[in-house]
Image (spheres, grey):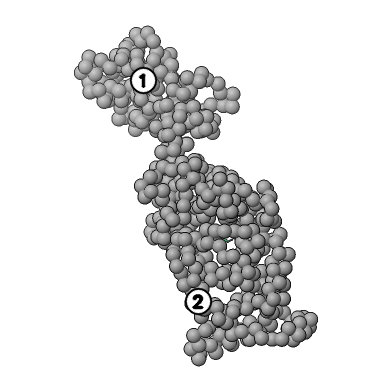
């Protein structure tokens, strides 16, 4: 399916890609995919003091990590380029010249002092119209040219038709929004330093790139009437707007650094899965059916719709993100979990080295017990650690020792366990469990205490995965050696 839907994500590279921007990118991407349209990435780098190439690279990297492939934009090209605003200056100039020639824009020579004085006067006389007082609007072209030739600084302003009236947009999220004509003055489209303003550059780009839907944060809603005026002056069709709500922190305030990590990079580095992260962000203000929470990428990319975007601000809840991440990890099959999470984490933790080789079944069996205990990737190494240690290197957690081993009767438990284990003919989880099973009754010691003591002896802690499975992976000789090492700690 292909359609003429064309959407763009247009970050300003003045910082890293933040959660809010990432969500905007996800919505644009998903909307394009769901409609067989085109997703464009454009770098809005017109603010030269705050935009850096480094930030652009960080944003591209974050987009790749999020899996939001763009059809046109940096590094992939396209028929509507260039895709960064600094390279499009010629197009803004051309468009401005055309508007000038058509009498839809005009040069304005008013000094800042003049503008301030006009504003004060309008305030003093309680003029309902407080904007630019249109002083230069009716200068004759000859006079204007003469002043330009004389080197007088000037800006270009758009000529808002006197009879334009209120600007009404039909926002896909907010519905009909009306902007009072009084708020619309002849605003600046080109500054005196020859750079275009955001409202002008954005519309020139969106119009020339054939953007059909503008999906962006609702902090831009107030810019929209001005942008509509630019479309109209250009004679270009006005796209559909969809202004998405802000993302708030738990305290109801706009999400910011105060709430913790806000950049995509930080979440990537913390080990969140891209799929889980995208799923979670997609749900901040959009829903599939009001209840489904785990929404795989392909479902998002086929089912996303603007109709299901909520008007209300969404709250970012790190706990829900963690939950989502654990859901995605738990849904992996053992081999995928081993390859993508467990082995890399073990390597990172220094528990294995690059040359690590093991029987596939052994790795899968380990993955099967580690995966359900892994909420974040780094947990995998902690959970699996006892398996990779030996009777000599195993670290005993002090609290676990005092709670589980250093207790009256536990010496006898370990002796009995050792004898039972020595008699195991086939070193498998089932046989190990079967050997330990009769001990509580035989020793008349609570089951919890028996298994607790063996667990601490074998794993050094009380929170390791199921005992039979773990001990099978550790191997018989080392299991027995661990009991020998732990024996003196038991009473
Ligand atoms: N560069 C703008 C921003 O990052 C884009 C706004 C828009 O989508 O029009 O806020």
Cα separation, mark 2 vs mark 1, equals 74 Å
Which one is in front in this view, the residue at disc 2 or the one at disc 1?
Answer: 2
Residue 100 at x, y = what percent? 70, 76
30 lies above or below 50 = above
In this picture, residue 104 sits left or right of residue 327: right
377 in relation to 147, above or below: above
Instruction: Give the percent coordinates (x, y) of residue 76.
Output: 67, 47
Which mark is on residue 468? 1
Residue picked out by circle 2 = 166
Determine which quarter of the picture holds residue 174. bottom left
Q: In this view, does 158 lie to the left or right of 319?
A: right
Quarter of the displayed picture in which ligand 1 can be seen: bottom right
Q: Judge by depth and name the residue closer to the eye, 241 or 435.
A: 241
Mark 1 neighbour class, 10 Å CA radius: few under 14, some 14 to 19, many 20 or more: many
Which residue is painted at 49% across and 41% down in the image? Answer: 298
Residue drawn at point x = 47 percent, y = 49 percent: 304
Q: Residue 422 or 253: which is nearer the viewer? A: 253
Label 2 element class: loop
């Amino acid at each position: 399916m292909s359609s003429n839907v064309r959407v763009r994500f247009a970050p300003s590279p003045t910082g890293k890609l933040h959660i809010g921007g990432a969500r905007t990118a996800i919505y644009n991407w998903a909307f394009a995919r769901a409609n067989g349209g085109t997703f464009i990435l454009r770098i809005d780098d017109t603010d030269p003091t705050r935009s850096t190439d480094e930030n652009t690279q960080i944003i591209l990297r974050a987009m790749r990590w999020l899996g939001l492939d763009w059809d046109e934009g940096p590094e992939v090209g396209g028929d509507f380029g260039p895709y960064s605003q600094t390279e499009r200056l010629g197009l803004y100039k051309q468009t401005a010249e055309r508007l000038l020639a058509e009498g839809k824009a005009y040069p304005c020579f008013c000094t800042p002092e003049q503008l301030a004085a006009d504003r004060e006067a309008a305030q003093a006389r309680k003029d309902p119209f407080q904007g630019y007082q249109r002083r230069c609007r009716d200068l004759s072209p000859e006079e204007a040219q003469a002043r330009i030739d004389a080197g007088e600084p000037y800006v270009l302003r758009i000529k808002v038709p006197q009879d334009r009236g209120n600007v009404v947009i039909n926002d896909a999220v907010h519905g009909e929004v009306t902007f009072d004509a009084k708020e619309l003055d002849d605003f600046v489209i080109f500054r005196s330093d020859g750079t275009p303003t955001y409202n002008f550059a954005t519309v020139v780009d969106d119009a020339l790139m054939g953007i059909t839907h503008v999906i962006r944060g609702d902090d831009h809603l107030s810019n929209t009437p001005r942008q509509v005026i630019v479309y109209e002056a250009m004679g270009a069709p006005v796209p559909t707007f969809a202004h998405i709500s802000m993302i708030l922190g738990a305290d109801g305030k706009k999400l910011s650094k105060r709430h913790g990590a806000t950049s995509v990079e930080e979440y990537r580095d913390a080990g969140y899965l891209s799929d889980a992260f995208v799923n979670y962000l997609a749900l901040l203000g959009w829903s599939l059916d009001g209840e489904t929470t785990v929404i795989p990428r392909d479902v998002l990319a086929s089912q996303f719709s603007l109709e299901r975007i909520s008007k209300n601000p969404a709250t970012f809840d790190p706990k829900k993100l963690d939950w989502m991440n654990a859901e995605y990890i738990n849904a992996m099959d053992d081999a995928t979990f081993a390859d993508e999470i467990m082995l890399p984490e073990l390597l990172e933790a220094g528990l294995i080295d690059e040359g690590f080789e093991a029987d596939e079944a052994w790795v899968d069996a380990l993955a099967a017990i580690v995966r359900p205990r892994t909420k974040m990737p780094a947990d995998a190494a902690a959970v699996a650690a006892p398996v990779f240690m030996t009777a000599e290197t195993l670290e005993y957690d002090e609290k676990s020792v005092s709670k589980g081993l250093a207790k009256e009767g536990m010496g006898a438990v370990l002796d009995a366990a050792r004898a039972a284990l020595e008699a195991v003919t086939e070193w498998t989880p089932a046989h190990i469990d079967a050997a330990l099973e009769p001990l509580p009754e035989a020793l008349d010691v609570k089951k919890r205490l028996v298994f607790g003591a063996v667990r601490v002896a074998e794993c050094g802690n009380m929170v390791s995965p199921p005992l039979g499975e773990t001990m099978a992976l550790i191997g018989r000789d080392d299991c027995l050696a661990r009991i020998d090492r732990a024996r003196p700690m038991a009473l």
